[in-house]
Amino acid sequence: MPPISRRIVGQILIDAALVSVANLVSFLLKYGPPALSPSDGHLRIVLVTLPVLVILRVLAFGMLRLYRIRWRYMSVHDLKTVAGATTLSSAIFAVSLKLWGFGQASAYSWSMQIIDWVLTICLLSGVRIAYRLWSDRSLEVTTQPRQRALIVGAGDAGEAVARELLRSPAQGIVPVGFVDDEPKRRGGRIHGLPVLGTTHDIAALTQKIGVEVILIASPRTDGKTLRDIVSRCESVPARLCLVPGIPDLIESSSAAGISRLTSIRAIKIEDLLHRDPVQTDMAELSGYLSGQRVLVTGAGGSIGSELCRQIAALNPARLLLLGRGENSIFEIQQELIREFGIAPTAIIADVKDRNRMEEVFLTERPTVVFHAAAHKHVPLMEANPSEVVSNNVLGTRNVAEIAAGCGVRKLVYVSTDKAVNPESVMGATKRIGEQIVSSLSRQYPGTEFAVVRFGNVLGSRGSVVPTMQKQIARGGPVTVTDPQMTRYFMTIPEAVQLILQAGAMGKHGETFLLDMGEPVRILDLARDLIRLSGLRPDLDIKIEFTGMRPGEKLNEELLYASEARRPTAHAKISVSESEPPSPLLLPAVDRLIRLASEGERDTLRDEILKVARGDVPYAEPVFAGGTPIRR
């Protein structure tokens, strides 16, 4: 049993004194001052019974763990514990008087005991509340400058934010009021702070009362509402911050019983997309990845590196990182060693080199493959069609055929929404990659194939968000191709979670579609990024329209008109039901690869789009595609 601390001993002594005072005052209120004179018998009763009452109360307080509660952090719940412990000890004392009497039980009438019960609760609670108020007051004395904060949301999360800020001046933020769109909360007060209006009043209130920080503390705020709040704050200089919710707001220290703010942070662009958390079936993922030899192609890229991180957490027998760029492969390898304590195998190889890929598969013998290696930049690939065919088409065929020929259990192909009705050579080559995987799934039933199709990911290298952020950092202008252009967006970690989940479901070359939410206008995205940087669109940072680039579409799609969409067991993943690819697909792919190798630039783009759209009139293969796999 650990020794009793001086704090607990002090609390016990104070409680004993308060119980004694409550008991003596109860006698005075019941029987008057003469009751405690030496000539009156009540004084003898007090001297006999008071030690028993004090012991019973202290024991009850200990049983209900009242002495584990620091007075500095007393709450309404803790005051209920005080009342419960007092009630319990009063009941035991009353029964003791009935059974044993202590010689003078008649002096403790029911009214006398009720008075004593009420006074004890009032004194014990009052001293604790007074101590907390004094402590809070003493903490308010600080020389640190404090920013005035307006809290958006007067619910439980907003109350928790206000309470913690009032008790934690070291945060450097002092709350001055709330805004809330709930009618019943308007005009109320929380911790002495008024509910000043609705979210429509934010801009006016910010200027009127000198707000420097706007804290959004409503955990159910959707992306549209958050975007509206951000746009209303466009004309004010206040800093916008987000408190995601009570589970993320309070971090408790079990040793000291201290709670503190940990999650107040700047709003990120992904907060404005309203992406519900992805629920992953870890048991299902572990079932097909734990203990397996997993190969990730394109492991140095944005999606590939995140695949490696999440797979590393699932305890694979071996993790193989394959990529062309030595620096990016080295970086993810070192990160996995540092963060996960594993020793992944780094493989510098090009998926276009069939002999090298055969060597990798025959040497490392992977059992699960994620094929994420691809060229993805639309305008660049329009200017380099032979390279995108070599990488995205030949590379995919090499990986898929060799994997199946070497007996790989499962291969997952990472595709894109640009593969649907493609107008760019990049999108067309990804569509051809989907068809190659679907076709090979029928030739190699021993390997489970799956295709995962989704839209843009936030933060990937060379994508729109990092590009715009760099433009903002340079002072603008921010370039947008067309004011009506829209795209689907998803964060990299959630996209990878769903890729892994879809991979567990794939068996026969199915195409899985990820729930991307609603498409986002690129113009709106640009304005939001400027606002989140503390600047004003069109005033501080100009937006310029440059016109659509070669290969770009105004709006992307996730599904062909001919594809039927069927739900799966996972709410955020569906599967498309489409016609199988033409039996002439692979011969057509052979011809396409030959044209790319010969540098037939003039006709190559048209041929790529023809094959992607299913126009494959070639009956005989004209390109061998490599030598048979060496065993």
Image (cartoon, rainbow, N blue to C red):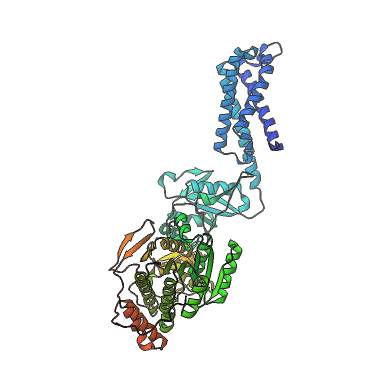
Can you say which quadrant of the picture contains the N terminus?
top right
Picture coordinates of residue 418 (x, y %)?
Answer: 38, 72
Residue 535 visible, this orientation: no
- Write down the quadrant of residue 79 in the picture: top right
Picture coordinates of residue 508 (x, y %)?
Answer: 36, 65
Disc count in the image?
A: 0
Picture coordinates of residue 295 (x, y %)?
Answer: 49, 69
Residue 47 visible, this orientation: yes
Depth check, front residue: 369 or 578: 369
Depth check, front residue: 17 or 460: 460
Depth check, front residue: 627 or 47: 627
Picture coordinates of residue 372 (x, y %)?
Answer: 46, 71
Compared to residue 5, the image places residue 210 above or below, namely: below
Q: What residue is shown at x 66% (from left), y 16% (from top)?
A: 33
Compared to residue 145, the image places residue 52 above or below, namely: above
Depth check, front residue: 411 or 604: 411
- Write down the quadrant of residue 87 in the picture: top right
Compared to residue 140, the image places residue 393 above or below, namely: below
